[in-house]
Image (cartoon, rainbow, N blue to C red):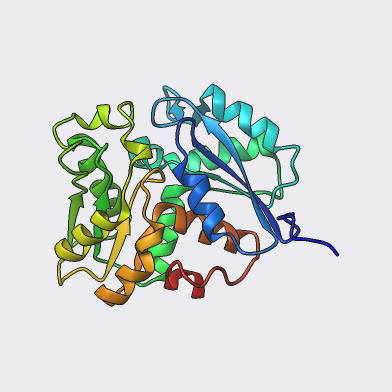
Amino acid sequence: MTRRDNWGWQARIGMFIVGNEAVPEAEWWAMLPRDVSVHAARVTAGAPWARWRADRSGVTLEDDLMRGARQFAAMRLSAVVVGHSSSSILGGPGWDDAVVAALSDVIGPGVAITTNGLDSTAALLASAVRRPFVVLPPWFNDAAVEAGIAYYRDRGFEPAGHMRYDPGRKWRDLPPGDLYPQGMGFEQEIEPLYAQIRAACPDAADGVLIAGTGFRCVGIIAALERDLARPVLSANQTSLWHCLRLAGVRGGPDSYGALFGL
């Protein structure tokens, strides 16, 4: 008898993730449909992971992004995603398209390339969400929060409100930039996040968007959709959904939001 070996004969997806994070792979593995595999390349670099040239004619990929792209080029992938919300948010207008073009030059034709910014935008449009309640991770400083809201406004959405998650008494007195170095990323709890989103989501919001691929949250999507009666989208969920669509795979998991039924 053969056993399931997670060989990606339907689709094989490459994902660039932050070098010291565990959340993206864990959440993708939880949501992956049968016969689809995910393969991670880790990136240690400041955001954004590709820098604009002086004349803004294109971007130069950071070393880890280039290294991973060259490796992905040999792996017969269906799609590749830059799984980093901060890069899309901080890259500025046109960054997503510019990095897609740069990666395509390395990885080659026939592989769909996307970014978390493009994925979340596509998911908001598919879900008919125009006034999202945007939830941001606690390690986003004030400037990053403002940039995140501006990013979605620039794409035609009008956030009905936003919040930065309060990680609790143990962490709230630390500056945002110290949370990950102090270990908060590996001690995330989703029950308090659920309670805060449910309490804070404004009536005017027609959906919820939880930004940040390192922000643990897919385990509460179904409960929030049930209780708020509106779509709930997250960074890793939208990237998996978009990569599946780009790879020609329909459907998806049953327990991680209505998005996979679209």
Instruction: Determine which quarter of the picture holds residue 249.
Output: bottom right
Image quarter for residue 127?
bottom left
What residue is drawn where x is 15% and y is 67%?
202
Q: Toward the viewer: 116 or 167? A: 167
Who's the residue at 74% across and 55% down the image? 5
**Place of residue 255 in the rendered image (x, y in percent of width and height, measured from the top left):** 47, 70
Q: Relative to 165, is 248 on the left or the right? A: right
| Quadrant housing residue 34 | bottom right
The x and y percentages for residue 243 are 57, 56
Q: Position of residue 194 (x, y in %)?
A: 26, 60
Q: With respect to residue 13, does 72 lie above or below?
A: above
The relative height of residue 128 versus residue 43 in the rendered view (above or below) is: below
Which residue is located at x 41 percent, y 58 percent?
Answer: 218
**Residue at x 75%, y 46% (from the top left corner):** 76
In x, y percent, where is residue 138?
24, 41
- Residue located farthest toward the front when viewing the structure as drawn: 1
For the N terminus, the image quarter is bottom right
Between 116 and 98, the residue placed more toward the observer is 116
The one nearer the camera, 69 or 41, is: 41
